[in-house]
Image: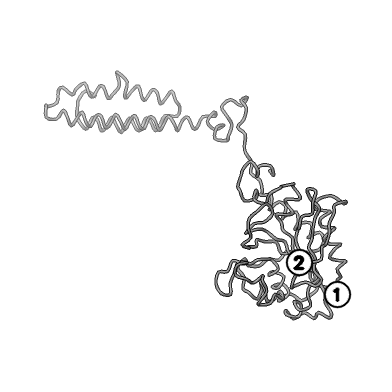
């Protein structure tokens, strides 16, 4: 090109971009760069004729030449990345291999399930082997399922607003997963044996063994001829399997619950002392009758276990607050 016109620049731009796009490797791309932008390249050749243009046309021509130069440089840069990405070395990098496969690899940090989830799954599996099915229910409950259906009278302290998280007059966050037992008995004819794991909510003062939100696993068996002996044997078998200790100590301490009669606290000997794990008892006949089950024919037992406390006993964890502190150092121990 021996003329200095905008048409020459336009032709140069089209041909240069086409040559860049056609380049199949780095040497071919470098040849295009030298042929266009080098000291003896086509762009320099066009600019040599700048002096032959009228004075008033020179600024516009120079600005146009600068735009062409920038477009060519940008196209060269993109093509360089494209060709680099197509190289075998780059393909290895995309597959996650370093350029030098003899170098040490980068450690991949794997997450883990939360200890409460781990223990909950283990509990469900053990009870499943004992013939229990899993049942579920809502976390927001009405007073019938949370209290009345469980034989808890209106004046009972368990219904005190200060002891519950009420949302409105008849709705509250469930304080126990026994609510699921009522729902099952309402819609399922006996015999049956179910467990109901899930969250419960109580405005307890937080300390090493108490929290305002925790997890329970409730169990219920209704059949003909069920006795307190069946209840004790089931809990003993469960804890022996869970803790893999046939010599572990379990005691049932007499207590009172409106929905069971007789009732007992379930205690486990742990860290040189007895820790309360939950409550249990024979289903009160009034509870059975309230959902239309003949208490003369059917009997049953129920129990409720705190999953966090089972996890504490399983992993020797001294404080329930560790489960919700979100301290990675604590959680990584269970990976």
Against 20, residue 323 (above or below) is: below
Residue 313 numbered tag = none
| Quarter where residue 34 is shown | top left
Q: Within 10 angstroms of label 1, few (less than 14), some, or many (20 or more) residues?
A: some
Residue beneath the point at 71% across and 64% down: 196
Residue that label 1 marks: 224
- Work out whether residue 333 or residue 56 is closer to the camera in this orientation and state it: 333
Residue beneath the point at 65% across and 53% down: 207
| Quarter where residue 143 is shown | bottom right
Q: Quadrant of the C terminus?
A: top right
- Work out whether residue 234 or residue 204 is closer to the camera in this orientation and state it: 204
Q: Within 10 angstroms of label 2, few (less than 14), some, or many (20 or more) residues?
A: many
The residue most toward the top is: 39
Direction from residue 44 to residue 335 in the image, left or right:
right
| Quarter where residue 8 is shown | top left
Against 102, residue 246 (above or below) is: below
x and y, in percent, of residue 56 in the image? 11, 29
- Work out whether residue 147 or residue 12 is closer to the camera in this orientation and state it: 147
Residue that label 2 marks: 194
Residue beneath the point at 74% across and 63% down: 304
Please indicate, yes or no, whether residue 221 appears anywhere in the rendered image: yes
Q: Quadrant of the N terminus?
A: top left
Residue at mark 2 to residue at mark 1: CA–CA distance: 16 Å
x and y, in percent, of residue 145 in the image? 66, 73
Direction from residue 224 to residue 207 in the image, left or right:
left
């Amino acid at each position: 090109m021996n003329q200095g016109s905008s048409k020459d620049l336009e032709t140069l731009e089209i041909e240069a971009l086409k040559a860049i796009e056609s380049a199949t490797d780095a040497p071919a791309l470098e040849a295009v760069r030298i042929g266009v932008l080098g000291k003896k390249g086509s762009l320099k050749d066009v600019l040599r004729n700048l002096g032959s243009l009228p004075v008033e046309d020179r600024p516009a021509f120079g600005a146009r030449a600068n735009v062409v130069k920038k477009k060519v440089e940008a196209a060269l840069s993109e093509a360089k990345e494209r060709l680099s990405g197509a190289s075998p070395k780059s393909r290895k990098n995309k597959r996650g291999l370093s350029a030098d496969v003899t170098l040490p690899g980068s450690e991949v940090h794997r997450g883990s399930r939360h200890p409460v989830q781990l223990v909950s799954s283990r509990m469900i599996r053990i009870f499943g082997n004992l013939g229990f099915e899993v049942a579920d229910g809502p976390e927001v409950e009405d007073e019938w399922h949370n209290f009345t259906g469980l034989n808890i009278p209106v004046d009972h302290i368990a219904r005190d607003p200060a002891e519950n998280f009420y949302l409105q007059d008849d709705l509250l966050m469930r304080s126990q997963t026994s609510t699921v037992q009522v729902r099952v008995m309402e819609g399922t004819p006996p015999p049956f044996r179910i467990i109901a794991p899930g969250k419960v909510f109580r405005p307890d003062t937080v300390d090493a063994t108490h929290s305002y939100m925790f997890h329970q696993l409730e169990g219920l068996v209704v059949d003909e001829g069920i006795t307190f002996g069946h209840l004790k044997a089931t809990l003993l078998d469960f804890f022996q399997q869970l803790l893999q200790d046939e010599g572990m100590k379990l005691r049932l301490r007499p207590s009172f619950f409106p929905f069971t009669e007789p009732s007992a606290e379930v205690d486990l000997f742990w860290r040189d002392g007895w820790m309360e794990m939950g409550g249990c008892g024979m289903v009160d006949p009034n509870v059975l009758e309230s959902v239309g089950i003949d208490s003369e024919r059917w009997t049953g037992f129920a129990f409720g276990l705190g999953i966090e406390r089972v996890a504490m006993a399983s992993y020797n964890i001294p404080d329930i607050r560790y489960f919700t502190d979100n301290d990675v150092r604590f959680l990584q121990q269970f990976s």
